[in-house]
Image: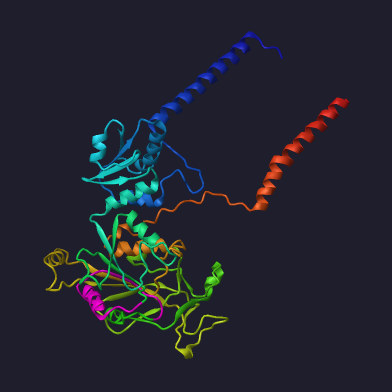
Amino acid sequence: MKINARKHLEIRLQNLIFTLLFLGVIGLLGWLSTRYSMQFDWTAGSRHSLSEASVKILQLFHGPIKVIAYTREEKPIRDLITEQVSRFSRHKKDLTLAFVNSDTQPDQIREQGISEHNQMRIEYEGRSELVMEPTETAIANALQRLAHAKELHIVFLEGHGERSPKGQANFDLGQFGEELANKGIKISMVNLGIISSIPDNTDVLLLDGPRVNLLPGEVAQIQDYVKRGGNLWWMADPGNLHGLNPLAGQLGLKFLEGVVVDASTQLFGINDPTFALVAEYPSIPITQGFSVKTVFPTSAALEKTGESEFERTPFLTTVRSSWTETGPIEDKIKFDADKGEHEGPLHIGFALTREKNPNPQNSQEGQQKATTDKAARQRIVVIGDGDFLANAYLGNGGNLNLGLNIIHWLSENDQFINIPAKTAVDSTLALSNMNMVLIFVGFLILLPLSLFVGGALIWFKRRGR
């Protein structure tokens, strides 16, 4: 087909218009990118986005937050800090970042308590917290410490073989204690055989599975603490309560004989019947919105006894296929009502509340607090298992998050309930020796060899023509 001059001009005009429109669209997109910011995270587990836990923490702040990073004039580390902080500022527009040269401002660094390069300080309403490393977890923990209106003190009873919040053995609570410390909660231990009373600044007293009997005077101190309105978390193991029976009676609870066994745990790959599974929770503050399964190894069942001034609400209940086994756990076991065993569902955890009634012998500060906050209620949690937060079991299901929820509820920080713990995404690839051999042979030997042979065959075939 012959193209005349007019047709040629039309084609040129069309090409010119297309080029102008294309450049215009590119320019418009470039201008829009400076006015609006949109980001998409398609990585597994959204590794480059702020976690749900961190977003919930940011929602607790209602004023501007300032982050100050003390670094050298090094672009890579400043870019890393900017990227981490920007994840938070996308969800809170009044969160700002400023850099201070750690080489040229030594006096300011010493004044602020900065000990190393690349540390940060977060400031909010006249208070501040240090961040030791530029990671989301470290920043989120510092923000949660700032969000606490006051310093919280959790006191663990010791001196009777209890699990230690600083111990690293499988049966200890060291990892849970570390989680509490990261969130700004102060942990201390008290031996009632050495000191005469429970410290006045105790927000929560925690009893976890003593191995030897408490002295009558020690039990009396704990009962007096409860009588005065102190918040308590008691985790008891099946069997001997080691002198704490009067405390159970004071709370209106009874520990049933035997160990809770649960046949349904086999469906989840747990071959030990003494592991009890809790999958459903009531709609109360501790477990509001909580739906993750929790696992309790070697637990005892509880029930209410008589009338009590406490409101006793069960919040940890096993499945129907469980029962209290009073005999030895060996070979085949089955429910036997004639032996006094109780059939599930069984309650293994209770939340107790009552209005605080200040004792005339209380300190002046305690009386003033009770007067100014008449709606305050005493909070107590009793669980028939002291192992579920141990280092060996803390990572099972929702055990860690449940433990944190209980601490927040007992310390009257309900706004922190349902903020899950930040967990690392498993980004490692574990391969067996056979898989590694197959990958090596396939990609480094067979694939190159097949390409070489295929190329050689094509070359010989073409040469033969």
Left or right, residue 381 beside residue 368: right
Q: Nearer the viewer, residue 10 or 206?
A: 206
| 220 in the magenta segment | yes
Identify the residue at the far bottom of this view: 338
Q: Residue furthest right?
A: 464
Which image quarter holds the C terminus? Answer: top right
Position in image of residue 23 (x %, y %)? 49, 21
Magenta span: 212-239
Residue 161 locus on image (x, y percent): 36, 72
Q: Is residue 195 above or below residue 340?
A: above
Does residue 135 show up magenta in the picture?
no
Identify the residue shown where x is 54% and y is 16%: 16
> Residue shown at 52%/75% (left/top)?
273
The part of the image, by quadrant, that contains residue 9 is: top right
Q: In the picture, residue 454 is in which quadrant?
A: top right
Look at the picture and state if 463 lies above or below 351: above
Quadrant that contains the N terminus:
top right
